[in-house]
Image: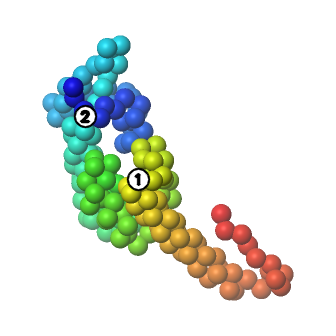
Amino acid sequence: MNSQRAYSPAEICKMFGISKSTLFRWEQEPWFPRASRDLSGQRQYTQEHVRAISENQKRKLGREYQRAIEQEDNHSMLEFAEALSLRKFLANDMTGLQELAEYPRLSINTIMQLVRLASEHYRPRDPMFCDILSVALTQSCKLRDMLSDASERNGDGDSDAPAGSEESLP
């Protein structure tokens, strides 16, 4: 019996943020491994498919990253690096999670993806669940601090605000 985890088309689409039509179109590409089907005829994907999609996304992001470098777009370069680390982690490469933990600040979307991944694939007592949530919490605090600092900087010169009033952070 094959103990390799099988993924549904919906799970793959959610994992990579793609549509089913994109996934099914990729099945026609030479780089995409042939998908098997279960007894009811539904497509099933394996870790081999996850790796192939990750590599394809990495190539695509690499081209976009190169354009960002040429245009000296630092914000886009950071977004691409973050996306590559997340894809690496989704392909079961633990260095991706370590890289995400070391980023100065992750986007809220990446933090939400990490929390969703932890809750959908791991149990609370699983060490991986704790590791993922630790990264998400640390990054959430960094984001909160950055928003708080920005709010304070914007509020310093605001003489119209009544004394004692505070703006709430989103």
Residue type beneath disc 2? Gln
Q: Position of residue 18 (x, y in %)?
A: 39, 37
Q: Amino acid at mark 1?
A: Asp
| Quarter the C terminus occupies | bottom right
Residue in front for this viewpoint, 25 or 92: 92
Q: Which residue is mark 2?
A: 4
> How would you rate the neighbour count of disc 1 (Cα within 10 Å): few for under 14, some for 14-19, many for 20 or more?
few
State the scheme by which the image is colored. rainbow
Q: Which is nearer the eye, 124 or 88?
A: 124
Q: Position of residue 61 (x, y in %)?
A: 28, 52
Q: Is residue 54 above or below residue 43?
A: below
What residue occupies the far top of the structure in this picture?
40
- Residue 78 visible within the image: yes
Residue at 21 percent across and 37 percent down: it is 48
Q: Position of residue 28 (x, y in %)?
A: 22, 25
Q: How many marks?
A: 2
Q: Is residue 117 visible?
A: no
- Residue farthest toward the front in the current orientation of the protein: 125
Relative side of 156 to 19, left or right: right
Name of the residue lying farthest toward the left: 30
Label 2 Cα crowd, 10 Å radius (few <14 / some 14-19 / many 20+): few
Name which residue lies at 33% across and 60% down.
97
Label whose residue precedes the other's in the sequence (2 or 1) = 2
The tag on residue 126 is 1
Q: Is residue 131 above or below residue 167?
A: above
Q: Secondary structure at mark 2?
A: loop
Q: Nearer the viewer, residue 159 or 20?
A: 20
Question: How far across and down, in percent of the image, does residue 68 sit?
Answer: 31, 61
Q: Which labelled disc corresponds to residue 7?
A: none
Residue 79: quarter of image: bottom left
Give the answer, above or below, for where 152 lies relative to 99.
below
